[in-house]
Image (tube, helix red, strand yellow):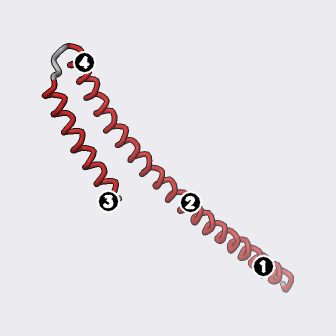
Amino acid sequence: MEAYEQLEKDLGQEIGKALEEQAGQIKENESKLRVTEEELQAQYEVVKQLQDQIAGLQVRADEAEEDVRKFLDGNYGLSDAVHDTKLLKQQLREEEKALEAK
């Protein structure tokens, strides 16, 4: 009977050590996962900002293409150019302020 009890005790200790090791590995992996998720979230934010910038640039490119088409068709005069220049200067000032705020 004594050998059986010792065997149960030894087995219990081995199982306890294995569970402790496993718990440590789980905590380490959870920590690594949190860091990876944070890095991934930061990358998503960068991608979102870049997508927003691309969308803004696409709008500007479309507007410029339309202006060129009007000019080539003869429907874009000096008053249109002055108006567009003023708008672009205003947009530039707004973008500079936004960059300074960051």
Residue 8's tag is 1
Badge 2 is on which residue? 33
Tell me which numbered mark, 4 or 3, is placed earlier along the sequence.
4
Q: Is residue 41 left or right of residue 80?
A: right
Badge 4 is on which residue? 69
Depth order, front residue of 73/3: 73
Q: Real-space Cα distance between discs 1 and 4?
A: 88 Å
Tell me which numbered mark, 4 or 2, is placed earlier along the sequence.
2
Tag 1: amino acid:
Glu
Q: Nearer the viewer, mark 3 or mark 1?
A: 3
Q: Secondary structure at mark 4?
A: helix
Q: Secondary structure at mark 2?
A: helix
Tell me which numbered mark, 2 or 1, is placed earlier along the sequence.
1
Q: Real-space Cα distance between discs 4 and 2?
A: 53 Å
- Where is residue 40? Give x, y as percent: 50, 53
Mark 3 surroundings: few (<14), some (14-19) or many (≥20) residues within 10 A: few
Depth order, front residue of 33/95: 95
Q: Real-space Cα distance between discs 2 and 3?
A: 33 Å
Q: Secondary structure at mark 1?
A: helix
Tag 3: amino acid:
Ala
Tag 2: amino acid:
Leu
Tag 4: amino acid:
Arg
Q: Real-space Cα distance between discs 2 and 1?
A: 37 Å
